[in-house]
């Protein structure tokens, strides 16, 4: 059954390319990620438990639900009639460059402050491996670490400033600053995902603006792979470094989530209805006095037989609602990404930057679910993305900016930037 699922993802990937001719379309990324992953699985044959349970059928239902809804939205959403024929919210408005600069400045101050605070705190504790300490501090809620309070609400500005700067600024200084800030921010969590999210957003924007080619993307992916190997090594204990293997690391981080889902995800096993998918709701109700605590985003480690604690994007939908949940929420994902992509492809400013933010979640489907589980962070990020457009509209859309920072083409298929 797994091989059949593999063939289906390959077919869907080629159909997506034929329909969109865009490697960053959801019609290519969504099935393409799984096709590439399963190809790697069959080539490498990792020493994991064989996938023989519900993962293949869940994957097929996820892809069919996602793509059927995404294609329906993209093809049948009317262009010149009905509600969507009206100008989408703030579509014709250019963002306030001044506010984007403020974002960059805040991120430039915030990241070094938090990183230095973590390093100093680790040194005071006498930590031998600061990389490991910072990683543990970022993943364990009860770990001894400095508290940043309200500053945590400014963390979304780090990625938001990169997306807006790469979309609207030509200044090499501005772009260099946001790149360095996002690289430094990855060391705050010591998570490879943080680096990848910033990288994929930047690459998508540059490719859409015809500033890089596919070959350049391939080079940067190789660089990221080499960096990930080094990064994984330096944050390990000395005893673990002696047993470190590049092949095992790559297998563990790419293929083990599928095996973990296949063996440890139990359908309809949630203690409370939708407690994983609707974690945001449970968190709010708990803050208001409910006895039901929200589930933790960091999952339990399980053996496949190597230890892993990621279960793919399918996990929360499956354990909360079973296979039907995987299919239905796959359709909701498809509607969401299909609509964003259609608006972004048409050259719509707002939807382009929002799609640039959410595109990494599609690329990381094989790891975990991030839209619902990180809903609070996502809402904060969207608000920060929209705010410069709101301010730009009130300021008359020009904001007193010079010619040097005129917006670059928003998408390779857009006829003119800023026109819908």
Image: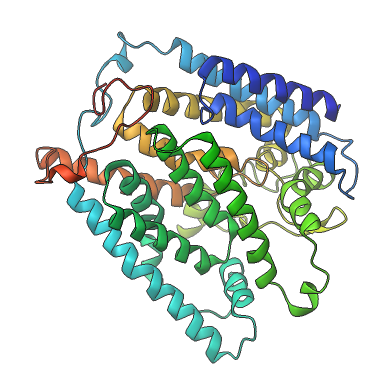
Picture coordinates of residue 227 (x, y %)? 61, 60
Q: Quadrant of the C terminus?
A: top left
Picture coordinates of residue 125 (x, y %)? 57, 89
Q: Quadrant of the N terminus?
A: top right
Relative side of 194 to 154, left or right? right
Q: Does 420 appear above or below 149?
A: above
> Front-most of 74 and 274?
74
Picture coordinates of residue 303 (x, y %)? 84, 57
Q: Does 241 appear above or below 186?
A: below
Picture coordinates of residue 134 (x, y %)? 57, 74
> Front-most of 262 and 178?
178
Render colour scheme: rainbow
* Any part of residue 332 in sight: yes
> Front-most of 323 and 313?
313
Q: Residue at x 70, y 48 (%)?
A: 271
Q: Residue at x 35, y 58 (%)?
A: 176
Quadrant in the picture for residue 192: bottom right
* Any part of residue 293 in sight: no
> Front-most of 270 and 408?
408
Relative side of 307 to 296, left or right? right
Quadrant in the picture for residue 136: bottom right
Q: Residue at x 59, y 53 (%)?
A: 224
Q: How many marks?
A: 0
Relative side of 383 to 265, left or right? left
Q: Residue at x 18, y 45 (%)?
A: 404
């Amino acid at each position: 059954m797994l091989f059949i699922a593999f063939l289906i993802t390959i077919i869907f990937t080629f159909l997506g390319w034929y329909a969109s001719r865009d490697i960053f379309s959801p019609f290519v990324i969504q099935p393409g990620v799984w096709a590439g992953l399963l190809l790697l699985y069959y080539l490498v044959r990792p020493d994991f438990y064989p996938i023989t349970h519900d993962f293949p059928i869940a994957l097929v239902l996820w892809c069919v639900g996602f793509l059927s809804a995404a294609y329906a939205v993209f093809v049948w959403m009317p262009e010149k009639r009905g509600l969507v024929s009206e100008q989408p919210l703030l579509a014709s408005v250019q963002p306030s460059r001044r506010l984007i600069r403020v974002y960059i400045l805040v991120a430039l101050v915030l990241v070094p402050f938090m990183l230095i605070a973590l390093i100093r705190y680790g040194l005071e504790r006498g930590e031998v491996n600061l990389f490991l300490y910072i990683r543990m501090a970022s993943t364990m809620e009860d770990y001894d670490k400095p508290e940043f309070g309200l500053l945590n609400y400014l963390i979304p500005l780090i990625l938001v400033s990169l997306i807006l700067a790469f979309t609207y600024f030509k200044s090499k200084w501005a772009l260099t600053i946001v790149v360095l800030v996002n690289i430094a921010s990855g060391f705050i969590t010591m998570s490879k995902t943080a680096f990848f999210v910033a990288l994929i957003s930047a690459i998508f924007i540059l490719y859409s603006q015809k500033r890089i080619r596919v070959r350049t993307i391939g080079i940067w992916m190789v660089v990221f792979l080499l960096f990930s190997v080094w990064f994984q090594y330096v944050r390990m204990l000395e005893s673990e470094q002696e047993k470190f293997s590049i092949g095992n690391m790559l297998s563990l981080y790419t293929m083990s989530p599928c095996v973990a889902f296949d063996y440890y995800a139990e359908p309809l096993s949630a203690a409370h209805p939708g407690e994983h998918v609707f974690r945001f709701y449970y968190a709010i109700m708990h803050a208001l006095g409910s006895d039901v605590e929200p589930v933790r985003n960091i999952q339990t480690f399980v053996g496949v037989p190597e230890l892993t604690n990621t279960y793919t994007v399918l996990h929360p939908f499956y354990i909360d609602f079973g296979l039907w949940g995987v299919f239905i929420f796959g359709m909701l994902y498809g509607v969401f990404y299909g609509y964003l992509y259609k608006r972004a492809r048409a050259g719509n400013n707002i939807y382009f930057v929002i799609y640039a933010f959410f595109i990494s979640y599609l690329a990381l489907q094989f790891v975990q679910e991030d839209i619902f589980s990180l809903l609070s962070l996502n809402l904060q990020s969207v608000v920060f993305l929209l705010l410069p457009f709101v301010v730009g509209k009130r300021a008359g859309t020009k904001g007193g900016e010079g010619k040097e920072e005129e917006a670059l083409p928003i998408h390779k298929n857009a006829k003119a930037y800023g026109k819908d």
